[in-house]
Image: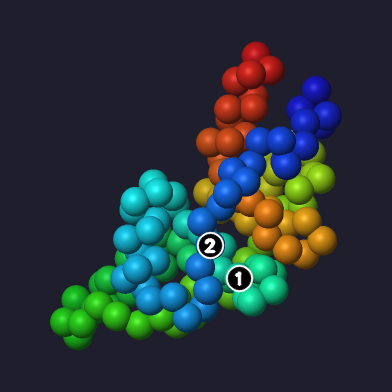
Amino acid sequence: MLNSLKVKDYMLGDALAFTPDTKILEATHALVKHQLSGAPVVDTNNRVVGFLSEKDCLKAALNASYYEEFGGLVKEVMTTSAITIDAESSLTKAAEAFVAGGHRAYPVVDDGRLVGQLSRRDVLKALEKLW
């Protein structure tokens, strides 16, 4: 039953995304404002080149506390090995990825380009509808 549900039908379609040159302070503010645990980092062709998590922002803030300056760019702290999920994938595959890995959200791609973001909560909402 979960196998018949597609990621594209449950993802956040208007996903927040950053460029590598976004200021880290601006990105941190956006994550807090949108209540997200992280967001994809994309290039000029909207291809995912990384992921900026709350943890990455905390590292930057902690480092800033030592040097008394909170600044820098997303590319300096982002995770460059971003794992993505295809929009056509089943929610079963997505749930398996969430259980196997420690990620709270994955960028969703179609033909290599960012089209949304899927969180653990999105998968749980889909399950709730099934039950």
Give how far across and how far down residue 36 sits, in percent. 44, 50
Residue receiving disc 1: 42
Q: Position of residue 32 (x, y in %)?
A: 34, 53
- Residue extending farthest to the bottom is 67
Numbered tag placed on residue 17 in the rendering: 2
Is 80 rendered above or below residue 31? below
Which quadrant would residue 90 be assigned to in this image? Answer: top right
Image x and y of residue 24, in percent: 37, 73
Q: In percent of the image, x 63 and y 56: which residue is there? A: 107
Asked which colour scheme the image uses, the reply is rainbow
Residue 123 in the image: x percent, y percent? Answer: 62, 34
Question: Is the residue 80 above or below the residue 123 in the image?
Answer: below
Q: Residue at x 60, y 20 (%)?
A: 128
Q: CA distance from mark 2 to mark 1?
A: 7 Å
Taking the image as shown, residue 67 lies to the left or right of residue 42, namely left
Would residue 16 be visible to someone looking at this image?
yes
Secondary structure, mark 2, is: loop
Number of numbered labels in the structure image: 2
Q: Secondary structure at mark 1?
A: strand
User: Does the residue at mark 2 contact the one at mark 1 (Cβ under 8 Å)?
Assistant: yes
Q: Is residue 131 above or below residue 35?
A: above
Q: Residues within 10 Å of mark 1 (few under 14, many from 20)?
A: some
Relative to the observer, which residue lies in front, 3 or 46?
Answer: 46
Amino acid at circle 2: Ala
Residue located at (38% from left, 58% from top): 30
* Number of other residues with Cα within 10 Å of mark 2, as a class: few under 14, some 14 to 19, many 20 or more: many
Q: Quadrant of the C terminus?
A: top right
The quadrant where residue 1 appears: top right
Q: Please name the residue shown 34% across and 51% down the image.
A: 33
Q: Amino acid at mark 1?
A: Val
Q: Could you tell me if residue 79 is visible in this image? A: no
